[in-house]
Amino acid sequence: MFGGGLGESIKMREELMKEACYLSLRAHTSAGKPYLSKKIRGSSETVFSFPGPWTVDGWFSGKPFGQRKIELNLFPSLRSIGNDEKAAVNEAFYGRFEAILKTTAFANEVKKAVTEKKQIIFTGHSSGGPIAILATLWREKWDIYFIHFVTRYDIVPRLMLAPLSSIERELQPVLHFFNPKSQFFGLESITTAPDASTFFMNVMRNVSAVTSHAACHLMGSTNSLLETVTSFIDLSPYRPFGTFVFCTGNGKLVVVKNPDAVLQLLFYSSQLTSEADIRDVACRCLKEHLGYENELQESLKMQNVAYLDDHLNETPLSSSGSVQGELATINTALNDLGLSTRGRLCLRAAGELQKQKQRNQDKIDFNKKEIAEKLESIRKYKTDRDVRKVGYYDAFKLQNDPEDFQANVKRLEVVGMWDEIIEMLKRYALPDEFEGREEWIKLGTEFRRLMEPLDIANYYRHQKNDDTGPYLIKARPKRYRFTQRWREHAKRIAQGSSSESCFWATVEELRNSDKPFEELKDTIMDLERDIDRWAQHEEIGKDVFLDESTFAKWWKKLPSQHKKGSCLGKYMSN
């Protein structure tokens, strides 16, 4: 983006920014209220502001970084869908937000504002910020509008990158300094005490470890020492998200969304020019946390804004480099943030990684037509087998005809293309939003429903279960696990409920079992209910019920009394 006011670029009125900042500060002086809400006069906007805790255990729950895994019932989107990896969240702040949901009228007030079509803003300063973050994420799909304002030296945005053990002794006095209700609020002697310098250096030492480790990955390092380091050094699990607006301290603003670039800026914008600066910078890292209202007011007056995202891989490497236009604006802003050449290289690497992810996605999108064509050939194979009254699962398993061999060739080609996609997802080498794209969820579902039965047929044809074990437990490929999770997440249905593509494996295990019917009855009845549901929704084909299908032959051997009461009787011939 070139030029333009801050409000226009982040889609938020500048007067509303000022009001949100004011209310976030006011929340800390309210009389014990867990949140404040205010309807902005003359507009359709409602602001919810949150105070926060001022004790160490209100920031850290005792673990190295006070983290826990997120609860998906409250935050269903906070996970890597295919990898099925939940996001980490600060346990202390999470507990505080959860208490607000359970013990106050907050949820009802938000619901009412949504019903009234109000524009809702969640805001928080200092320890209230994490509560506002969780509130924003709780309202799913609002997180893209989240905006963080960060001054150059403020220690709080960096604090969670340090383990509690490294800062515990100095943290409580610092929290007293930040607490408007404390007798030590803003006390000058705290900022100039030796402990302030110790606190700053300990935090930034840990920030350095996190950003250096991240920078090695950005630059494509494959050194095995990287992973060795993480085995004996605790690195913070937290990473930035949303839009960050860095305030340089002289009225300029630097806007960046790329999370890798933000992480590097949090470190390189707080560097010392010499050891003699430690005391001065340690003082500023505390004082700046209390100066956001004035800083924002001055910066919005000047409207000197640099937008990094579109120019990260062009970041000038020299502070005195000869550049023009937007790059000149960016260079000046980076100079004001004190970015070194190494810091600028890290920004370039972040930009290049972002572009590489987009190139990877473009390549996959280009292959989409070929994938669809190969799936169409398998669909034709399935239709041809149906005409012959032999389901394609059984025909493929028997491999009696040349068409079955050709279908296997197509199978290997198309699963190879999907495996490439899955490997990229496992490495987080695609844009974060890829797994939520509707066209790929649809194509992934078609792929899974057509191809997985063939994989299962091949598995049991070669009796791999004898050596490896049951398909579902030991052998199901990630290409099917991932695409199933995509659909379940998109449809907001229970995990495991969209397993219509792999029920054949359950059938194979049941028909090979030597256990008596009574021991298997519950499993059989669950399977029958699922098959009935999938058949009604046309999520499985009628070929399942053909007389010569593996399923029909097995089902007909079940006890007569059971079959009479089965929900599948209506599909089966006598």
Image: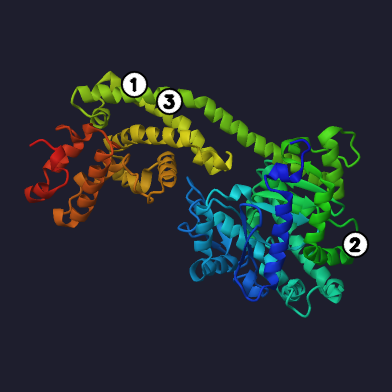
Looking at the picture, tell me which residue is in the foreground, 95 or 498. 95
Measure the alpha-carbon separation of dots 1 and 3. Answer: 17 Å
Q: Position of 324 compared to 132: left or right? A: right
When the figure is inspected, residue 42 is found, relative to residue 557, above or below; the finding is below
Give the residue displayed 36% in from the left and 49% down from the top.
Answer: 496
Where is residue 219 shown, x and y percent of the image?
A: 70, 41
Mark 2 or 1: the one toward you = 2
Please name the amino acid that badge 2 sits on. Answer: Asp
Looking at the picture, tell me which residue is in the foreground, 94 or 349. 94
Judging by the rendered image, the residue that carries numbered circle 2 is 277
Q: Secondary structure at mark 2?
A: helix
Where is residue 296 shown, x and y percent of the image?
A: 79, 55
Asked if disc 1 and disc 3 are in contact, CB closer than 8 Å, the reply is no
- Mark 1 or mark 3, which has the lower sequence index? 3
Please name the amino acid that badge 3 sits on. Answer: Ala
- Residue 125 visible in the current orientation: no
Where is residue 525 shown, x and y percent of the image?
A: 20, 51
Where is residue 298 shown, x and y percent of the image?
A: 84, 54
When the figure is inspected, residue 499 is found, relative to residue 130, above or below; the finding is above
When the figure is inspected, residue 136 is found, relative to residue 185, above or below; the finding is above
- Colour mapping: rainbow
**Label 2 Cα crowd, 10 Å radius (few <14 / some 14-19 / many 20+):** few
Judging by the rendered image, the residue that carries numbered circle 3 is 372
Asked if disc 2 and disc 1 are in contact, CB closer than 8 Å, the reply is no
Measure the alpha-carbon separation of dots 2 and 1. Answer: 72 Å
Looking at the picture, tell me which residue is in the foreground, 128 or 389. 128
Q: Could you say which disc has been placed on residue 406 in the image?
A: 1
**Label 1 Cα crowd, 10 Å radius (few <14 / some 14-19 / many 20+):** some
